[in-house]
Image (cartoon, rainbow, N blue to C red):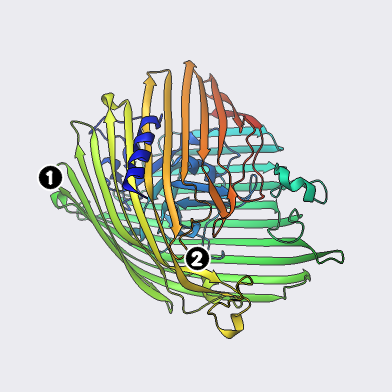
Amino acid sequence: MSIERTRRAALAAGLVVFSFPAIAQPGVETPSDIVLTPGRSPEAVSRSGSAVTVIRAAEFEASSGKSLADLFRQVPGVSVTEAGGPGQAATVRVRGAEARHTLVLVDGVRVNDPSTGASEFDFNAIAPGDVERIEVLRGPQSALYGSDAIGGVINIITRKGRGGYRGFAVVEAGSYGTAATRIGVSGGTRNFDYAFALSMARGAGFSSYGYRVDRLKPHLAGPLENDSFARLGGNLKLAWRPVEGVEVEVGATATTNRLQYDAAYGSQPDTPSLARARFLTQYLRFSADSFEGRLRHSVTLFANQTDRSYKDISYFDFGFGPLREWSRYGYAGRRFGAEYQGDLKLDRFGKLIFGARIEEEKLTSSTRVVESLFNSPSRDTARQQTRSLFALYQIPVGSRLDLSFGARLDDIENVDRFITWRATGAYRIDETGTKFRASVGTGGKAPSLFQLHSPQYGTKSLEAERSFGVDAGVDQQLFGGRLTLSATLFRNRVTNLIDFSAYDAATFSYPSCPASQLYSGCYQNVGKAETSGVETSAEAVLVEGLLTARASYTHLVARDLSTGLKLARRPEHEGRLAFRFTPMEGLSIEPVVQFVGVRYSSANQVYKLAPYARFDLRAEYQLHKHLAVFARGENLTNARYQEVYNYGTTGRAAYAGLRATW
């Protein structure tokens, strides 16, 4: 990307991006200005040199039936792809990196699924229960969190009970047979607090394949079938403080999903295939202060598991009538381990964070043939252990400059060992409300259990993927905090990428795989990619008490350096503009426009997807201090677009509900 193109993109975005969350005055920190993820401990966002965005609970209070993935569409530098309607697979990419390069945490606990092909995370695996905030940390973060954090880190933080008793209930219903509800309670005393939430959602949905794709109609054998979904989830968090400076915390998040989906291959992809998934993550964390609060110890025991099963139905036609293939696939992923972290306060010499971690991952996969042309029964198991050491030193230099330096060693048993590092800087000019920030670091992504040990495709000699990334940005407050502008330039390069190599029928070329895999293909460290661009966002109060607005814009160039072609499903231009209008007390109206530019659905610039703009509208009225009614409309202009080639997206839809608090 040329300097001139970057300059123009940043200038154009700076003129249009606005946002409506509460804006702090320069130099004044409030509790909402504290972030946890950039430094693995509470830190004022004004002192962080990282690019971090916080999504607060208010952003999804009135959307109980929507997936968490949809929330990330408002974050600069983040793109979301959903293969069909509600409940279908959702992937999130940060700064153009692969979905597997985004590390996902729930309350600080790693939850990337070891049972998937590359340990990526499906955000539909989590029901939106009582989430307090989501922190999106962009750029390589392996020095802090280890493998998978090449593109960034997403930390989903559930609510912690505070103060007196609090309860809420939300019900919603609308288009495509959708119905959802959330209910939760929380509270606490000086020594004990609790929070519990339960959420349920279901919908008739629409056909993932072919819905509202007009060019497919002449080729369909009959009417499309809807792909329904049902989801039940909950989260629990308890904390006990027996004495001053000591806390014991227990947390758990669980979800069960049932959804119909359409096969991605065969002569008729619209199939009655069925998937079931169960997800559970849990932790026990013990924290204690020593040396009069100068050193805080934290020990976390954690475990999470994912169980997925598929009744996979496909249809084939070889010219002598349709044939059906029906197989059952099962995948189980397990992770458990322990982590120690010490936070040492050094007064004017800063803060030292250090620790160690050990975890074990296990994958079990099975295939049971019912009616199959190509599959045979199988059952396979693989496991690996990772040991890690990490340290982060944060130091203030005078009253305006904050620096941090971190490093980490990850040792994957019998696989690979890699060291990553990271440095950040933030410089504040409080008199003008200006902050300059920059970060540079490396990332690593260990090969997944499937890539290593799959009997058909695995390669045991794979090494970790590596990355190098740098960014620089500025945050500027104007007009007494009524307007905040933010812009970040970034560049990331990933090498040693793990790609799947297979026989190319067009060129009659064979992959450099072992003889037993010449026709099936195998995984190899053969790829490299580069992403660069600019992220912009801002916050503004246009008319005090009446009109606020927000937007974000990302310009992204993402290329496969081996071919020079654009990476799949990465739009070069993506933006969002939203307003909040409050014409009377208790009433708010929020129109939103989302724009996504041209991108390609598949690798090697195959299946070009047209740009689109989608218009949504949300309104809420506070009937009583404890009762509100809300409504939202999606895609009100009935725009036709695809996020995955041949897979449908919502038409014009409406939803409404009630929210009660006590």
Q: Is residue 159 above or below residue 255?
A: above
Looking at the image, which is closer to me, 98 or 131?
Answer: 98
Is residue 191 visible to the viewer in this orientation of the structure?
A: no
Q: Return the residue found at the far right.
A: 320
Looking at the image, which is closer to me, 269 or 113?
Answer: 269
Q: Is residue 442 above or below residue 7?
A: below
The residue located at (32%, 34%) in the rendering is: 485
Which residue has dot 1 on it?
398
Question: Which sits earlier in the primary sequence, circle 2 or circle 1?
Answer: 2
Mark 2 or 1, closer to the camera? 1
* CA distance for labels 2 and 1: 43 Å
**Residues under numbered marks 2 and 1 in contact, where contact means CB atoms less than 8 Å apart:** no
Crowding near the residue tagged with mark 2, few <14, some 14–19, many ≥20 C-alpha atoms within 10 Å: many
457 vs 484, left or right, is right
Q: How many marks?
A: 2
Looking at the image, which is closer to me, 275 or 511?
Answer: 511
Secondary element under disc 2, as helix, strand or loop, is: strand
Q: Amino acid at mark 1?
A: Gly
Q: Return the residue found at the far front.
A: 507
The image position of residue 304, as x and y in percent, is 51, 60
Q: Quadrant of residue 442?
A: bottom left
Q: Amino acid at mark 2?
A: Arg
352 vs 607, left or right, is left
Q: Which mark is residue 215?
A: none
Q: Which mark is residue 335?
A: 2
The image position of residue 561, as x and y in percent, is 43, 63
Crowding near the residue tagged with mark 1, few <14, some 14–19, many ≥20 C-alpha atoms within 10 Å: few
Is residue 209 visible to the viewer in this orientation of the structure?
A: yes
